[in-house]
Image: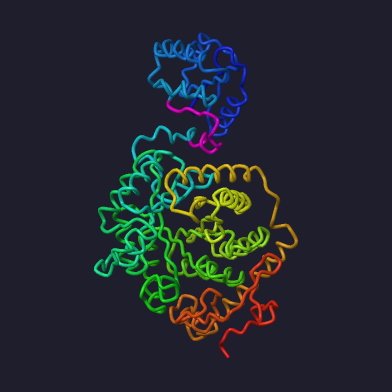
Amino acid sequence: MKKILGASMGSDVHTAGLLNFLELARNEGYEVIYLGGAVPIEKIIKKIDEETPDVVSISYRLGTDAFENLIKEFIEKAKKLKNYENIDFIFGGTVETSQVARKYDLFKKIFDGSEEEEDVVLFLRGQIKYKEEKNFPSTLAERIAFKSPYPLIRHHIGLQTIEETIEEIKKLAESELLDIISLAPDQNCQQYFFEQEKMDPNQDGAGGAPIRNEKDFVAMYEASRRGNYPLVRCYSGTNHMVEFSQVLKRTINNAWAAIPIFWYSELDRRSERNLLDAIKENMEGIKWNARNNIPVEINDAHQWELRYAHDSLAVATTYLAAYVAKKLGVRWYVQQYMMNTPPKLSPKMDIAKSLAKLELVETLKDETFTPYRMIRTGLLSFPADPNSAMGQLVSSMFYSSYLQPHIIHVVAYCEAMKRATSKEIIESVKMVKRANSLASRGLPDFASDPEIKERVNLLKEEAMVIIEKIKSLSPQKEDPLTDPETLYLAVKEGILDAVGLQGNSVAKGKIKSAVINGAYEAVNENGEVLREAQRNLGIQ
């Protein structure tokens, strides 16, 4: 058991922060020695000599000039201790006294009051002592376990040039605020990395960083090897799914792959693949990652929701994706819950839809399949005004913390206006961490709300009607839900459809939806709600 000694120095009687710190240390298994407030330097030094603690925590809040004098005396005497080299000294105070503390090389860690509880706990778990990459958890499952019960924080980065992106990655890693950095390549990279002769140079940097070779990936990964050594992942390519996955494993130790079932096809025109071929190739990509012990996210549901799919279909495609992942051998599965999408959902119906998804996905959980929950704000809902966007970001992440996420995918408040740099990302992460921290103290039990409970049950029932309709397309198949031809027909025949697919070459695009009581419902020509048993699925 490690031993920690704490005291407020000099004439400082303030001890609330120190006591909170020591209580967290006790909860983490430390033996705690508390000397109290207004402790003379001589007494602190004597106790350190007697107790030989592993960590010494000094607190001071009364002002910079007095602290400057005290700290010089303390350092002079501390250096004479026989076990001085074996002690980690840390400091807690105000922003101004912390500035004084930073002038000296005594302290391994300085807390100025701006940190969240999780930052303190992670220090106590030893993170601050890690000087080499090998000491940090390097897989998603390990990182989640290490940081539990606090969620991992993720953000993406992809600026106009490789050089800009690398510099911003360095800043993000050094901030130690992110646990996961997602690389965002431009569309040229995602679509034509293996066919670069097809790239349009006028589109270089559109939507992300213009990554053109494996050296670019390696350089970005190396830029992240500092600070808290965050995990690194990357958006998948929109074709050559297996080859792109292999590149990401070789170059950035991809934390997890995000591959859809239906998308990056003629359905969304992000590649030139026809839908059936895309489904087949996407499944091969998922299987390759599963075989190589790489976690997988199948992000189909939010792709449907971004095209204004009604809630029942969003829940059905969530379950379908998780089911397919499990059947294709995925061991660790990242389930994303994109809030505020479509954008006119009420918070109550947003939570209801997410709970319906969650409950269905969790039915698949066993010793071979571990689903992780990841929440994010839907970019579609962000206003262009930065202050309004901050409000949207914080409020959505506050109430969605009810889902007890393993990962929070932060979307910077500026994303509706411009790409985020490290400045906006760090600002947004701090906002979200505070919202999650406050929510963790206790939210109402949304699941027991009668209206939410009724909606959750309805959506689960409706989703399974859709699933059964898909199965009915190929009753002769052993498992229609993992059969590419059956899934292709589900889109072609209109079982899976969305308003945003009107005029599409392969989807029906005939469904109508409306916001009713804060929820997205499929409706008929008169605006009346259509339940799945009634909905014209186009399979007469």
Q: Position of residue 349 (x, y in %)?
A: 66, 62
x and y, in percent, of residue 60 in the image: 55, 19
Residue 305 vertical placement versus 227 (above, below): below
Measuring 47% from the left and 27% from the top, which residue is drawn there?
110
Q: Is residue 503 above or below residue 295?
A: below
Q: Is residue 350 left or right of residue 194?
A: right
Residue 79: in magenta span: no
Camera-side residue of 81 and 101: 101
Indicate the quadrant where residue 452 lies.
bottom right
User: In the image, which residues are magenta?
Assistant: 108-122
Which of 232/55 is in front? 232
Q: Quadrant of the C terminus?
A: bottom right
Farthest residue to the right: give it: 450
- Asked if the stretch drawn in magenta spans residue 110, the answer is yes
Q: Nearer the viewer, residue 160 or 432?
A: 160
Q: Position of residue 11 (x, y in %)?
A: 59, 12
Q: Quadrant of residue 243?
A: bottom left
Q: Residue at x 45, y 34 (%)?
A: 126
